[in-house]
Amino acid sequence: MKKKIILIFGGRSAEYEVSLLSVYNVSKALDREKFDVIKIGMTKEGVWYSYYGDDEMIKSGGWCGDTANLHSVSLIMQTGIREDDTGVIFDKSIPVFPVVHGSYCEDGRLQGLLDMCGFDYVGPGTAASAICMDKYVTKLIISHRHIPMADFVLIHRGNENEDIIDKVEAKLTYPVFVKPANAGSSVGASKVKSREELLNAVNEARRFDDKVLVEEYIKGREIEVAVMGNDEPFASRPGEICPNSEFYDYNTKYINDTATYFIPADLPDETAEKVRSYALKIYRALCCKGLSRVDFFVRDGEVYFNEINTLPGFTSISMYPSLMQDHGFTYAEVVEELLKYAKENK
């Protein structure tokens, strides 16, 4: 008998297009002899539909215009998800893989909704998702675990221009990185080399969040680790990204595709084990479950925590599935393994 699975995709965040690419790959990977895949998409306006059309339409972004294959849906706490126009109910015994990224999705809001409706789902819970999405709160927690990280300054919405310059220059030296506290995929992030560039970068980051982080620039190798599991998580061998651009920004990740990936990373054994150890320590400290990708900088043998992503990309070039494939999983097995952890994620 086939097992039913709900894939949720899309959403109102700036990472909507990344979600479409991710869910396209996840859906293609699931064996239709084993799984009955229910696809539920959220438009950029936040309207929910069940979608019965071809995965290629999701990949191209045309799914929400494919009206012949759309049914409006609503979440009912007593039952689960209902197709409003057909009366079909997807009950809450069906596990959910929320293949979504960014605001309104990866930040705990979607997880809270699924919790209220009683669904089991892949990935960290409401509190862990919200904490990990906020880079400032994450840094505060990890700072108590004695794991090195870049120094930083927090800029609030109310800070005046002169205050911003004074705060940054009193603590950091150029170049610095400016990024929204709550965003992923390097959305709104800038590398700033002078005072003249600083305020423009802060205003760009403010388009995505009221809180902005200005971080010390650590010139090091960009190293990532995939973590999977609940009570006894597993950390992959580290992989390395060489952006071949100013930094690993949104365009490099998803548009220009100029980056080079090395899996596993060419690191001394001692450094690689330190990275894996830090990844597991961070994962546990932030109460993550299911999966996360933990990112670091490595410079002269020293390891610095950068950030954590609780629902990392699953595109064809994404590091999370690639790192797990390095350990012998196929892409399909990565997805199926993650679904096993959904039931335990309470």
Image (cartoon, rainbow, N blue to C red):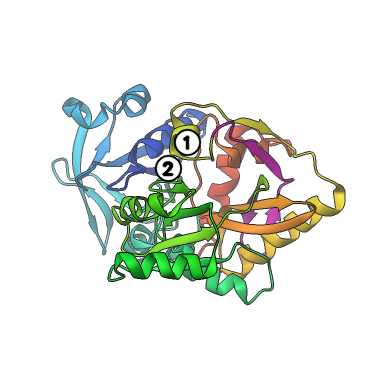
**Near-viewer residue (25 or 12):** 12
The answer to whether residue 126 is visible is: yes
How far across and how far down the image is residue 50, in percent?
Answer: 26, 39
**Near-viewer residue (271 or 110):** 271
The picture quadrant where one finds residue 305 is bottom right
Name the residue: 48% across, 70% down: 137
Nearest to N terminus: mark 1 or mark 2? 2
- Circle 2 — which element? strand
Q: Which residues are magenta?
A: 226-245
**Hey, what amino acid is under mark 1?**
Phe
**Near-viewer residue (195 or 119):** 195
The picture quadrant where one finds residue 110 is bottom left
Q: Is residue 37 above or below residue 213?
A: above
How far across and how far down the image is residue 341, in percent?
Answer: 57, 55
View extreme (left): residue: 85
**Near-viewer residue (60 or 194):** 194
Total labels drawn = 2
Label 2 Cα crowd, 10 Å radius (few <14 / some 14-19 / many 20+):
some
View extreme (bottom): residue: 144
How far across and how far down the image is residue 282, in percent?
Answer: 63, 65
How far across and how far down the image is residue 61, in percent?
Answer: 29, 28
- Contact flag, marks 1 and 2 (Cβ < 8 Å): yes
Question: Is residue 235 magenta-colored?
Answer: yes
Label 1 Cα crowd, 10 Å radius (few <14 / some 14-19 / many 20+):
some
**Hey, what amino acid is under mark 2?**
Lys
Question: Is residue 246 magenta-colored?
Answer: no
Left or right of residue 150: residue 131 = left
Q: Is residue 18 above or below residue 199?
A: above
Label placed on residue 4: 2
Which residue is labeled 1 in the image?
35
